[in-house]
Image (spheres, rainbow, N blue to C red):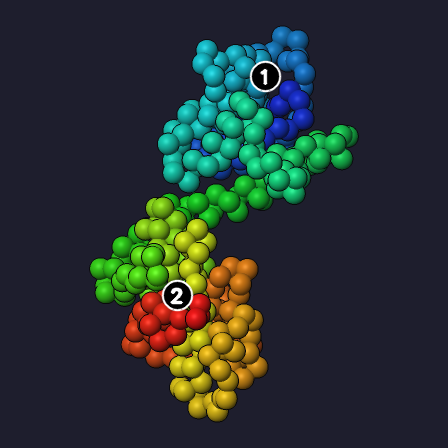
Amino acid sequence: MSTTYSKIILPTRPQPDTVVAIFILKKFGREQFPGIEKAVVDFWQILPEGESEETLDAKGVVLIDLGGGRFDHHAARVKTTASDLIAGHLGVVDKASLAKLLEYARRDDFFGKGTVSEDPIDRAFGLSALIAVLNKSLVKNPAKLIDYVLPLLIAHHNEEIRRTEQLPLEFEEKIKNGEVETFEVRQRDKKLRAVILTSDNGSFAGYLRSQNGGRFDVVAQWLPSGHLNILTRPTKRVDLRSLSALMRVEEAAQAGYSIEMGVRDLAKFGRLKEIPEWYYDPATNSLQNGGLNPKEVSPTKIQKNGLKKIIELGLSEKAWDPRI
């Protein structure tokens, strides 16, 4: 009869490394540790008299950082973390979707730098700081911290699966099917890489702007609903003013709006009541036709087959240079 695992034991209140370790154990350990996904977390400073890791394992108890066992990183011969020990034991230490979580646990455990930024707001709201303040407010019920933090790690990991596994395959498939347009445009002294595609996946724009996704500087993403959003890579500091004006001019022409506005007014941030389909967001440096959840915003009437030309003309600033 196989053992059902019902308890995970820590020696002290949860730390970033042990929280990540518990996430990995619950997520990937179901085959080796049946029932572990439902196991509760408890805290022992020492093992009960007469017990060992082996005897407790037979009773469905997993020890983390306690008892000098397989998941006690303090007893390891090399510098490591509980997260790495568990990931290694389960054969997932090289899984791309876990890379950031494992590195976060190492950085926090080895150097106390779960948050590298020196900005006080970043540090106050970084995960390590939030775990610390949760521990202070949950002194009598430290296991509750796991309930609060695990959903955040689950959401992060789900996004990493999309970014490292699902999106590369989907993008490759779209390229094979001729559903992607890529091109380059020069804006002043910068060469911009742009891509146009259709997808309702909200993670695509971020992926395509990342190192793994090709580092595109401009991503124009059509939604199946006909809405269109144009996003940029922040570090490239793309100037969207000329493109904003052109998109609004084209929208007005296609929709039959009668507008009497100068080009500088058409390039303004925010939403123009005369052309409500488009919002120029200075915070994200993007042009949004409703974002990923359009609701009351109507789909653009700009034609797909003319979009590339508009983007090229707008980004190159050949029709209008906003600096003049």
**Can you tell which mark lies on residue 220?**
none
Q: CA distance from mark 2 to mark 1?
A: 50 Å
Residue 66 bears which disc, if any?
1
Please indicate whether residue 87 sits to the left or right of residue 115 in the image: left
Image: 114 above or below 53: below
Q: Could you tell me which residue is drawn at 28 percent across and 61 percent down?
A: 184
Residue under the point 50% across and 89% down? 260
What residue appears at the point 57 percent right and 19 percent down from the top-left corner? 65
- Secondary structure of the residue carrying numbered label 2: strand
Q: Which SS class for mark 1?
A: loop
Residue 203 in view in this figure: no
Res. 270 in view: yes
Where residue 107 sits in the image (x, y, percent)? Answer: 52, 28
Say what amino acid the circle numbered 2 marks: Gln
Pinpoint residue 313: horizontal percent, then vertical percent.
Answer: 33, 72
Q: Which mark is residue 221?
A: 2
Q: How many marks?
A: 2
Q: Quadrant of the C terminus?
A: bottom left
Provide residue 240's location: percent of width, then percent of height.
Answer: 44, 66
At label 1, the amino acid type is Leu
147 displayed left or right of 91: right
